[in-house]
Image (tube, rainbow, N blue to C red):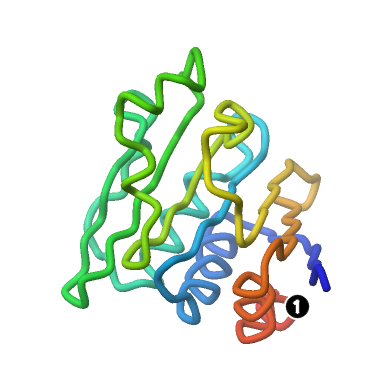
Amino acid sequence: MKRRFEGILHSQGALEDFAAQLAAHATADLIIYLRGSLGAGKTTFARGFLRGLGYHGVVKSPTYTLVEPYSFDSGLVCYHFDLYRLADPEELEFTGVRDYFNAASICLIEWPEKAAGFLAEADIDCTLEHHPQGRKISLTACSVKGDRLMLQSQPDELL
């Protein structure tokens, strides 16, 4: 079953809080695709998600570095990818991209369509869109793990 959720988040803070609540139920070996146009809130979602995992430092967009790692005392590493500037998906092979997808990591991937065929499949596919009242968020579970996370976090109760 592909669990789906759609809702409106009325502010940047609400988007961060939403992502933090989702992260509160997340475990390692998780992949979330973040889709949307420029300025739709993908990095804001990543910032909130990292806060929900317990990260309190600066969360920067890895637009030029492609990936930014965030390590936690538990051994978990969350990799935040921004593939906007990726010219060719094969460039990812030179970064050792396959090593990032492992049982001890969570991967948040902005612009996953830029690397089609070179990424592991998403557990949750998240799309953010501009909306007159803030941001529209759509989540789709793409795996049993993604479905379980959405069930546990009950996103419809987070608005």
79 relative to 25, above or below:
above
Residue under numbered circle 1 = 156
Residue appearing at x 72%, y 56% in the figure: 137
Helix, strand, or loop for circle 1? Answer: helix
The quadrant the C terminus occupies is bottom right
15 relative position to 50: left or right: right
The percent coordinates of residue 2 (x first, y second) are 81, 68
Residue appearing at x 40%, y 70% in the figure: 28
Residue appearing at x 42%, y 40% in the figure: 81
Q: How many neighbours does mark 1 have within 10 angstroms: few (below 14), some (14-19), or many (20 or more)?
A: few
Seen from this angle, which residue lies furthest top? 87
The quadrant the N terminus occupies is bottom right
51 relative position to 152: left or right: left
Q: What kind of residue is marked 1?
A: Asp
The percent coordinates of residue 125 (x first, y second) are 67, 54
Q: Nearer the viewer, residue 97 or 109?
A: 97
41 relative to 46, above or below:
above
13 relative to 98, above or below:
below
Seen from this angle, which residue lies furthest bottom? 152
